[in-house]
Image (tube, grey):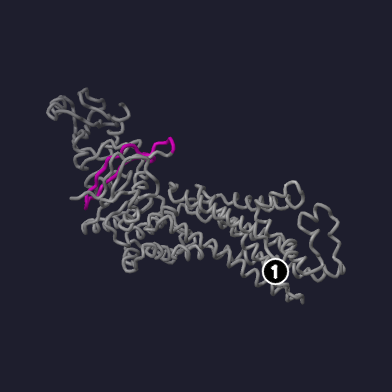
């Protein structure tokens, strides 16, 4: 527990800043909705004819004039990018920072096993991700209420659940990479999150590479699918968890016997 | 005295790079053991291998009779380690870090920590990132000593400490040693090894080239001779490490002391000193001897 609490303490500033930034951007978007709705008119078809651009963000299958359609696209992107990057940064630095800041010598010469360090640090990653998502969801409900719209609870909660799972998957991958790094490289984490994001966009645009949907976690976060199915795609989700578990297993295996850099 | 640290052909390679090669060491309970060598000779590698931070390549080592690889978790509670770099979580306060260290050991060391902080003048309210190297070192000392372990690994502990603090540090160490603790002191400051250690090993390029009582390490070699009144080196066999200054000549002499004296009689000397060489000279001697091999 000590290491877990220590990590929460060390990470609290960054967690607050990321949470506040994501909430701020989400709220600005939500507050833009009333004006957007009145300009679009009842059918909300303005964005339906931008071809590939429309498809890239799933806008061909969502009504931009409804709260959930608008929320799914605008806010989904904010949460997908912001949350994804936060999870990537957190995961990639969690283990590697000990060697980068040369505190590993301090930590591992105390009678704590590597396994305990791995478990408690992973728990700290997950706890921070959950904290961020719960807070963001809460504020986004409040935001929708503040513009006088009805809250589409089912779709909204499903969407946020999907992004939470996405962040867990990305964090697990980056945690694995972190175990291999000698000196923390946060750039790699962000690059990885962005790569997955763009893979999904490409898969949206081109039918030839639809298989990429089985690779990227952004596939099960597709707002158009969630709104239309009123459910999450269980195949993608199970695959996502399987990838995350495999990544963690590889990362643990490495770190348990790693030479700690001086 | 039972051996506290025992290594047998302990070897560590970093990929193809040498760390330490076939290290054989035995440190007994209650010793202050010096470990001498320049930067990059393998001092830290030895300690880091013994503590399980890095994996040995081959050989065997035991601490308190426990295998360093298999029983790492049983060994660590008995050890106080002070790394040479002394880096900590920068955003923490000194007091928090010292408590965290005790927490990780599952111990309450508040009373001992307080005494140590007072003796070493550690400011517990300051943030780690505001500290100078010397002050970080002092925090490292408190973390290594507060749980009163029976064995200390100190990696160049005095670098960055002012002379007063060095003195206080060694007096604390000697108190602990009198109470039965064993100290493994890695250093390249030879005078402190000579002053505080009973036995010492000299390491060079990953290999131990000498290991003995410090008094014997010093004795086995030559005498340090300074002659005043002449400006040219006398031609006596057994002289090496010759230095010629303004009005004096100094050198190390190895051989019959009578032979030296009779040769000196003929010289127009105004003064003469013959002393034991310091560890410094011994150290250089060993290094140069190995170099010429």
Q: Residue furthest front?
A: A235
Quadrant in which the C terminus of chain B appears: top left
Say which of A24 and A241 sits in front.
A241
Q: Is residue A260 left or right of residue B119?
A: right
The quarter of the picture where residue B114 lies is bottom left
Say which of A22 and A231 sits in front.
A231
Q: Is residue B109 left or right of residue B181?
A: right
Q: In this picture, is B189 found above or below B240?
A: below
Residue B235, how many percent across, how many down?
A: 22, 22
At 61% across and 61% down in the image, what residue appears? A165
The quarter of the picture where residue B242 lies is top left
At 60% across and 66% down in the image, what residue appears? A132
In what element is the residue under mark 1? helix
User: Is residue A262 among the parts visible in the rendering?
Assistant: no
Say which of B264 and A67 sits in front.
A67
User: Is residue A251 among the parts visible in the rendering?
Assistant: yes
The quarter of the picture where residue A81 lies is bottom right
Say which residue label 1 marks.
A156
Q: In this picture, is B148 found above or below B24?
A: below
Say which of B147 and B243 sits in front.
B147
Q: In this picture, is B204 found above or below B88?
A: above
Give the main secondary structure, helix, strand or loop, of the magenta stretch.
Answer: strand
B246 magenta-colored: no
Residue A59, how many percent across, how many down?
A: 79, 59
For the record, the magenta segment spans B15-41
Residue A96, how many percent across, how many down?
A: 51, 52
At 17% across and 28% down in the image, what residue appears? B255
> Which chain does the residue under circle 1 lie in?
A
């Amino acid at each position: 527990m000590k290491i877990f609490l220590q990590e929460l303490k060390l990470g609290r500033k960054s967690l607050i800043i990321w949470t506040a930034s994501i909430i701020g951007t989400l709220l600005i978007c939500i507050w833009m909705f009333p004006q957007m709705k009145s300009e679009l008119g009842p059918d909300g078809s303005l964005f339906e004819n931008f071809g590939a651009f429309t498809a890239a963000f799933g806008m061909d299958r969502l009504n931009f004039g409804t709260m959930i359609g608008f929320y799914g696209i605008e806010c989904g992107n904010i949460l997908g990018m912001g949350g994804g990057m936060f999870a990537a940064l957190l995961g990639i630095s969690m283990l590697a920072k000990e060697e980068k800041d040369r505190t590993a010598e301090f930590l591992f010469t105390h009678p704590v096993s590597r396994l305990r360090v791995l478990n408690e640090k992973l728990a700290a990653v997950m706890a921070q991700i959950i904290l961020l998502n719960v807070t963001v969801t809460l504020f986004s409900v409040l935001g929708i209420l503040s513009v006088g719209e009805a809250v589409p609870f089912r779709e909204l909660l499903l969407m946020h659940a999907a992004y939470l799972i996405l962040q867990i998957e990305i964090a697990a991958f980056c945690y694995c990479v972190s175990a291999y790094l000698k000196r923390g490289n946060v750039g790699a984490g962000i690059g990885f999150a962005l790569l997955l994001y763009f893979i999904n966009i490409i898969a949206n645009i081109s039918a030839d590479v639809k298989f990429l949907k089985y690779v990227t976690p952004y596939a099960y976060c597709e707002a158009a699918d969630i709104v239309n199915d009123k459910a999450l795609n269980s195949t993608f989700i199970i695959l996502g968890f399987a990838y995350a578990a495999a990544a963690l297993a590889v990362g643990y295996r490495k770190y348990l016997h790693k030479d700690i850099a001086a | 005295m039972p051996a506290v640290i025992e290594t047998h052909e302990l070897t560590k390679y970093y990929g193809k790079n040498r760390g330490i090669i076939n290290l054989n060491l035995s440190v007994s309970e209650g010793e202050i053991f010096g470990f001498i060598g320049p930067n990059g000779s393998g001092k830290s590698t030895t300690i880091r291998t013994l503590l399980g931070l890095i994996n040995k390549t081959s050989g065997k080592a035991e601490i308190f009779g426990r295998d360093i690889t298999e029983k790492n978790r049983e060994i660590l509670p008995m050890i106080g380690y002070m790394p040479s770099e002394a880096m900590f979580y920068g955003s923490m306060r000194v007091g928090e870090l010292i408590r965290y260290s005790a927490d990780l050991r599952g111990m309450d060391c508040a009373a001992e920590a307080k005494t140590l902080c007072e003796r070493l003048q550690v400011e517990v309210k300051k943030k780690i990132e505001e500290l100078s190297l010397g002050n970080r070192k002092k925090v490292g000392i408190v973390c290594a000593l507060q749980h009163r372990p029976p064995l200390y690994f100190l990696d160049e502990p005095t670098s960055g400490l002012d002379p007063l603090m060095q003195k206080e540090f060694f007096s604390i160490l000697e108190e602990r040693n009198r109470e039965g603790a064993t100290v493994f002191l890695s250093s390249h400051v030879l005078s402190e090894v000579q002053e505080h250690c009973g036995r010492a090993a000299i390491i060079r390029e990953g290999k131990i080239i000498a290991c003995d009582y410090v008094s014997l390490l010093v004795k086995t070699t030559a005498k340090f001779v300074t002659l005043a009144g002449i400006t040219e080196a006398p031609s006596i066999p057994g002289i090496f490490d010759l230095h010629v200054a303004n009005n004096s000549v100094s050198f190390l002499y190895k051989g019959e002391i009578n032979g030296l004296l009779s040769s000196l009689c003929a010289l127009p000397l105004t003064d003469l000193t013959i002393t034991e060489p310091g560890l410094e000279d011994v150290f250089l001697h060993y290094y140069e001897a190995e170099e010429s091999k």
